Amino acid sequence: MVTMQTTNSTAPRPTRPVRSGILTLLAILLGTVLAAALVGLVLLSVTGWLRSPDETASAQTSSVSVGSDVTSDEPPQTGPLTEADGLIPAGTDITAGADLPAVTRLDPALRAAVEAATAEAALDDQPLYVTTGWRSARYQGQLYDEALATYGSEEDARQFVATPETSTHVTGTAVDIGPLDAMYWLLEHGPDYGLCQTYANEIWHFELATTPGGTCPEMLPDASYLGG
């Protein structure tokens, strides 16, 4: 009897070639994704570079939350004058320490000098009030228009009320003082704090015009020479 030997005809699995092909495919896909991302970054940079300044400013503005607490110190430009314009309510006596725009928007050095003078005046039983201090340009413009109507000419009106462009009240560098006794008190003691009457026809109008203890400059005849 002849014994037949059989052989296993099953071929070995090509594991290595298949694994190598998968790795190659993954490398190609990864390279494609990275290339696409790089192209996107380049396009984004070019778009931002080409954006106009107006568009850039608009984008920056739109990034601020609508509900954010953003306010302006500037008073409204229409409607009646208010405390925001530097208006001091009628019948109200305020000092340089008051929490009103008429004094809080004064030049800090001027305000400090008036506060110090007020404290010394109190030792002499002399009240010293700020009757007007900082004013908005709109407030000053209204006062000037009223003066123009009263005096009939710009030349005469500007002797007492300056235009908004020249007023030292608008710049916050002048205060008007009351009552009358306080004006005379400040004429005598004001130079100790650098405070001087600057217009000969306005005994109530004071500015920080010298160093503390210094000599006040010669007064100008009226507000038409340098504001008011």
Image: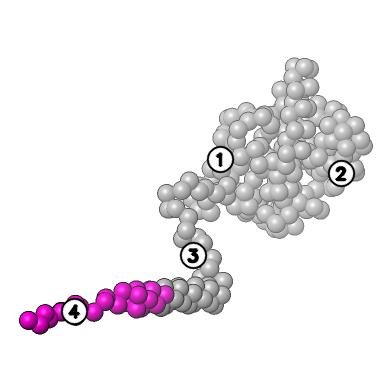
Circle nearer the N terminus (3, 1): 3
Disc nearest the viewer among 1 and 2 = 1
- Which of marks 2 and 4 precedes in the sequence? 4
The residue under label 3 is 59
Q: Amino acid at mark 4?
A: Thr
CA gap, disc 3 and disc 2: 53 Å
Most distant residue in the left direction: 1
Q: Residues within 10 Å of mark 3 (few under 14, many from 20)?
A: few
Give x and y (percent) for residue 184: 81, 28
Is residue 20 within the magenta segment? yes
Instruction: Decide which of 187, 40 is in the foreground and name it.
Output: 40
Q: Which mark is residue 219?
A: 2
Residue matched to label 1: 83
Query: Is 113 above or below relative to 56?
Result: above
Say what secondary structure mark 3 lies in: helix
Task: Give the labeled residue for mark 4.
Answer: 7
The residue located at (75%, 23%) in the rendering is 119
Q: CA distance from mark 1 to mark 2?
A: 30 Å
Q: Amino acid at mark 2?
A: Met
Question: For mark 1, does the 10 Å Cα neighbourhood hold few (<14), some (14 to 19), or many (20 or more) residues?
Answer: some
| Spatial separation of the CA atoms under disc 1 and disc 4 | 109 Å
Q: Quadrant of residue 174?
A: top right
- Viewer-nearest of discs 3 and 2: 3
Q: Relative to residue 176, is residue 55 drawn left or right?
A: left
**Is residue 154 magenta-colored?**
no
Secondary structure under badge 4?
Answer: loop
Using a 10 Å C-alpha cutoff, classify the residue at mark 2 as few (fewer than 14 neighbours), some (14 to 19) or many (20 or more). few
